[in-house]
Amino acid sequence: MSDKPKAYLAGPAVFHPAAKALLDYLVEMCGQHGLQGVAPFEPEAEQRGLPPAELAALIRRGNVGRIRECDVVIACVSPFRGPGSCPGTTWEMGYAEALGKPVVAWSEDMRPYKERVPHDCDADGRSFCRQHGMLVEDFGLVENLMYAAAPAGVLPDFEAALTEACRQAEAARQGAG
């Protein structure tokens, strides 16, 4: 058992064709920074032959348990299947924050969210998404204000997120002790 703070690695890496190798690399990087990386992965789950709904429930329960056991969440909020972050990742971030755990977000795309959403402007200068006709959030932030406006904001890479996660995990441990 490790005395290192545990960091849950939220993000769409689980959907990468080489997910296991990528997650192993991220866990290794955590170790090099004094954290014990915890990946959201059920390596044997697909081998169990469960129906899809049961498999999904198993994965969800596993990830909820992992988040509970961790000291901090490091979340990749890079655009995923569109201009914004993975909805599962943002759910995990909110869940962790509700549990009082520090959450550190990072993205490979630091452009303001508005620049990534195809939009048109009306006569008043308001931006509307071309696909849905809804207003496009325009605070100049990388992502949705609910996490991009957090004290650490969204960091530009995994390395910066690791450094901030170490700082926040240590501060949380000192506050608990």
Image: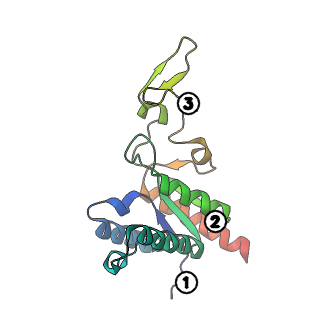
* Separation of residues labelled 2 and 1 (CA atoms): 18 Å
**Residue topped by disc 1:** 3
Q: Say which amino acid is labelled 3.
A: Asp
Q: Earlier in the sequence, mark 2 or mark 1?
A: 1
Q: Say which amino acid is labelled 2.
A: Lys
Quarter location, residue 16: bottom left
Quarter location, residue 171: bottom right
Is residue 147 visible to the viewer in this orientation of the structure? yes
78 or 84: nearer the viewer? 84
**Residue topped by disc 3:** 138
User: Who's the residue at 59% across and 51% down the image?
Assistant: 152
Q: Position of residue 167 (x, y in %)?
A: 59, 64
User: Who's the residue at 48% across and 36% down the image?
Assistant: 113
**Residue topped by disc 2:** 101
Q: Position of residue 46 (x, y in %)?
A: 33, 74
Is residue 34 visible to the viewer in this orientation of the structure? no
Among all residues in the image, which is located at the extreme bottom?
A: 1
87 or 97: nearer the viewer? 87
**SS state under label 3:** loop
Q: Earlier in the sequence, mark 1 or mark 3?
A: 1
Q: Earlier in the sequence, mark 3 or mark 2?
A: 2
Vertical placement of residue 139 versus 146, above or below: above
Q: Say which amino acid is labelled 1.
A: Asp
Vertical placement of residue 44 versus 121, above or below: below
Q: Residues within 10 Å of mark 3 (few under 14, many from 20)?
A: some
Q: Position of residue 53 (x, y in %)?
A: 43, 67
